[in-house]
Image (cartoon, grey):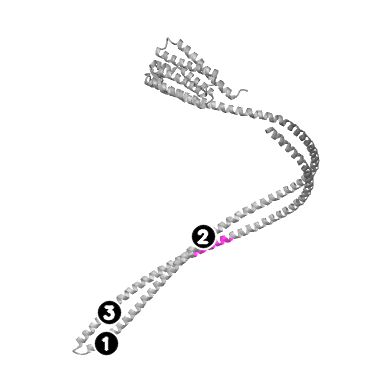
Amino acid sequence: MMSIEVLWQNGKETVNRIRIVLFFIFFTALLGTKDSMPPAMFLIHLSGTIIMGVYASVCFLWLRYGNPPEWFHKLLIILDIGIHLINTSIDCSMGPIEAKSALNNTAVLLVVYFYLIYSGFLGNPWFVLLNGFFAGLGVFLSYYVSVTYGGLIPTEDPILYIQTGYVGTSAEIVKGIFIIVSGVLLSRLIALLIRISDKGIEKAKESEELLQKSIQQKKLLQNAAKNLESSIHHCGDYISQTAERLESQAASLEQVTAINTELFSSFESNAKIINNQNIKITDLFSGSNDLNQLVVTISDINQELILLATENKKETTEIASVSKRTSEYLTSIKSSFDKVDEINQIVAEIGEKTNLLALNASIEAARAGDVGRGFAVVASEVSKLAYFTATNAKIISEVVENSRKFILYGSEVSMQTGNLTTNQIQKLEKTMERVSYMHELFEKQKTIIFDTLGRLNEINDLSSQILFSTKEQISGQTEVNRGILALEDEVNQISNASRNLEQYVEQIRFQSQELLTLSES
């Protein structure tokens, strides 16, 4: 089998052979286009082709009689790309026509792609990537030279782009980027091929080792197969015995099934009873809702009663205040009348004094001579007394007027008290009506409670029926337990047989593991 080193060595020889073929193609093409090319361009391309032929011949001889190092092959590939791009750049500097022709020459790009492809024959992805960047920079250099020295005018107009003297900037940039991307993709492809090659070598070694192990393990597999056949034979015997036990177990299960059928009928009866119970509970729930509504209504009425009581309290407070004011007015009236009494006493005293003065005046009038002087004195006293009496009369008039006002205020307050008392009586009557209505609601509530108790009694009867049915279920469950005990005995016997079966199964498992280990290894 050919090793990977031999394959890579053949790749190096293939690269140089391709180089020699390209040399003859370039040389023949130059001779054919000699008359149509400018002399300077012909000499430049001829020089590059001859240089390529020289180092290709050197590499051929070295490969024939020796083994050139890898760096030598890399250097030659770099020279291939470099000479090709230098010739293109020189063509781009010779004039607009030559530059336009060089940039539009598709064969130039194809040759560059060809160089990138056979650079991968060396088996180094990084070298391919380097050549891709190198070739892309060469394309950018050719564009720069054609614009700077070749006289081409860069443009993006598609009409001008196809005319002589113009070059498309974006198109040339895309060419360079495309070459670089091609180098990247080719380098990744070479790296993938190298990994696949390494994995193939690894798998080939593993296959060789597996072949040797397979030969050694063949005998072990034969012995394991014989032992496995014997274990399976014993396992078949135990399985037959287990089948007989299972038939007996099936009969027990039939009895259990019959008992379960009876239990199912009992369960159906319980379901009907429970359904009736649920209906009763639903009715009870509905009655509870009505009761709840009544309670809410009673609560609202109680709130109204509380509000009425609050208003009665407020009005009672106002009545107390009015009564207090009435008492104050009456006190003021009493005080006024006391003052009237005092004034009356004063008037009485004045009357007495007036009488006394009149008596004195009469006596003095009886005298002769001095009558005029005494009468004058008496007259003066009477005048003062008259003034004093007039003043007290005015005070009495004011006191009487104030007393009248107080009496009027007392009358108004008494009227307010009467009105408040009337309103309070009306509200008390309304309160009595509410209380009567509450009494009716409580009577309805009492009726609902009695109905609820009746429903509860019915539910109690249903519960008694469920209890009786449950006892029947318990009796049936006892029969089920007996069947289960019989089934348990059968299961124990099967379990004992299964233990013996487990030993053989363990042997089968161990032998299967050996076979699995052998097959996996």
Q: Residues within 10 Å of mark 1 (few under 14, many from 20)?
A: few
Magenta span of residues: 425-439
Q: Nearer the viewer, mark 1 or mark 3?
A: 3
Quadrant position of residue 13: top right
Task: Name which of mark 1 and mark 3 comes first in the sequence.
Answer: 1
Q: Which of the image's four quarters has the N terminus?
A: top right
Q: Position of residue 254 (x, y in %)?
A: 78, 43
- Residue type at mark 2 is Glu
Q: Residues within 10 Å of mark 2 (few under 14, many from 20)?
A: some
Q: Residues within 10 Å of mark 3 (few under 14, many from 20)?
A: some
Residue under numbered circle 2: 304
Q: Main secondary structure of the magenta part?
A: helix
Residue under numbered circle 3: 388
Quadrant position of residue 335: bottom left
- Residue type at mark 1 is Leu
Q: Secondary structure at mark 2?
A: helix
Using the image, determine if residue 442 lies above or below residue 282.
below
Q: CA distance from mark 3 to mark 2?
A: 66 Å
